Image: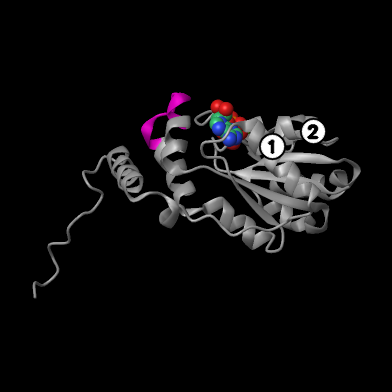
Amino acid sequence: MPAILLAGTPGTGKTRVGLILARLTNYVFTTVTWLVLENRLWSSYDPKTYSFIIDENLFYHYLEEQLPAKRMIIDTHWVEPFARIRSQVEYCIVLRTRPDQLWRRLEARGWPPSKIADNVEAELVGLIAREALESFPDRVYEVDTTNKRPADTAQEILEAIRARKRTTKPIDWLSETPEQELTRILEMLARARGGGHGITPDNTLPRA
Ligand SMILES: Nc1ncnc2c1ncn2[C@@H]1O[C@H](COP(=O)(O)OP(=O)(O)OP(=O)(O)O)[C@@H](O)[C@H]1O
Ligand SMILES: [Mg+2]
């Protein structure tokens, strides 16, 4: 049965939106983390990062064998393995959040600045959206969650599914974020990295 992938940078709202979307459709909501834990698809545990290391072979195997049996909405920040079962993926929805708002959401989780910066930077350059487009060039539907509520986002996705709309114009925060906000976010990124303005002048260059 076809699955709906719900991808995006941490904090873009995958879990909140996915749970609502599952209620509005008759799909089962799950996350890659749950699939890995429930089905013991991990190879080891890293006590430093408190995380299970996915056994990629077991995971691929699981997708190939088990996915066809269920209608699932799968919350993931890892899109690439699903390319192996491309025909089973009906939609790859990518949630996007303007970097300044994503910063606030991740800050509210109490995350350290360096971890926030890693994720905000990934969102700013559209890392996951790019990976999604590489894996599913004809079925990536990006949804901007900025200034919306999770229920609105779920509704927007439902309408796209009903209208069988599977592609969108890619979102590019570097050109779409108002200049003042973009400057502020670049300054916050530089501060989180411990630098001043994020630029190290190269004094070894010969002067003209
Ligand atoms: N339009 C929106 N759509 C979805 N979530 C939103 C929206 N606006 C604000 N949020 C908020 O964003 C926060 C992050 O949501 P959520 O935990 O679902 O993210 P996630 O993508 O699942 O993150 P992670 O990958 O870390 O699990 C929640 O507090 C949610 O209420
Ligand atoms: Mg989540």
Please report contact status of discs 1 and 2: CB closer than 8 Å, yes or no.
Answer: yes
The residue to which callout 1 is attached is 154
Looking at the picture, tell me which residue is in the foreground, 63 or 154: 154
- Ligand 1 contact, mark 2 (Cβ < 8 Å): no
Residue at coordinates 14% horizontally, 69% vertically from top-left? 205
Residue 120 among magenta residues: no
Some atom of ligand 1 lies within 8 Å of the CB belonging to the residue at label 1: yes
Q: Residue at 79%, 33% (x, y): give it.
A: 24
Which residue is tagged 2? 24
Residue 17 in sight here: yes
User: Mark 1 is on which residue type?
Assistant: Ala
Kindly state the secondary structure of the residue where label 2 is placed: helix
Q: Is residue 142 above or below residue 184?
A: below
Q: Residue at (73%, 49%) from the top-left corner?
A: 160
* Highlighted magenta segment, given as a residue range: 106-114
Colour scheme in the image?
one colour
Q: Quadrant of residue 42?
A: top right
